[in-house]
Image (tube, rainbow, N blue to C red):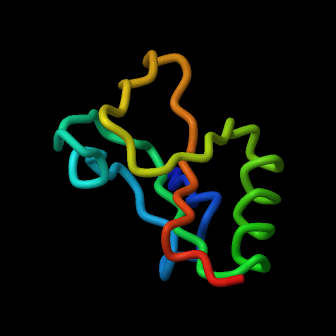
Amino acid sequence: MNLVAQSPFAGLESFVSENVALAPFTWYRIGGPARYLVRPRSIAEAQEAARRCAEAGIATAAVARTAAAKRPERKFRPSLMRFSHFAV
């Protein structure tokens, strides 16, 4: 029997990426990987991603361009929502 876990963000690949290095998004170009990086382009996309995080029990953290991105503890791997491309 083969078990395949489906991503909680299936169908949202246009603005959700998995296992993304955070270094390109920080001022000093350092930072560990994010399990999920969500870059919504609209309020509806942000709401859908937040709903799926809640359903899957995934913690979320909103981030902006920072001097450094601290690598979360292995037990706490939140999805990160970056709003630099957010159109209101």
The answer to whether 47 appears left or right of 30 in the picture is right
Is any atom of residue 11 visible in this view? no
Residue 71: x and y in percent read 36, 25
Is any atom of residue 13 visible in this view? yes
Residue 61: x and y in percent read 62, 40
Q: Quadrant of the C terminus?
A: bottom right
Instruction: Answer above or below: position of 21 versus 73.
Output: below
Question: In the current view of this chain or complex, which residue is farthest to the left?
Answer: 29
Q: Out of 4 and 72, give the one closest to the viewer.
A: 72
Query: Residue drawn at (45%, 16%), measured in percent from left and top?
Result: 73
Query: Residue drawn at (47%, 56%), measured in percent from left and top?
Result: 37
Instruction: Answer above or below: position of 43 versus 26.
Output: below
Residue 41: x and y in percent read 60, 81
Q: Quadrant of residue 69?
A: top left
The answer to whether 8 appears left or right of 47 in the picture is left
Query: Residue drawn at (22%, 54%), measured in percent from left and top?
Result: 24
Residue 56: x and y in percent read 74, 46
Disc count in the image? Answer: 0
Q: Out of 10 and 46, give the one closest to the viewer.
A: 46
Q: Out of 74 and 47, give the one closest to the viewer.
A: 47
The answer to whether 80 appears left or right of 51 in the picture is left
Q: Quadrant of residue 81?
A: bottom right
Query: Residue drawn at (61%, 46%), measured in percent from left and top?
Result: 62
The answer to whether 72 appears left or right of 9 in the picture is left
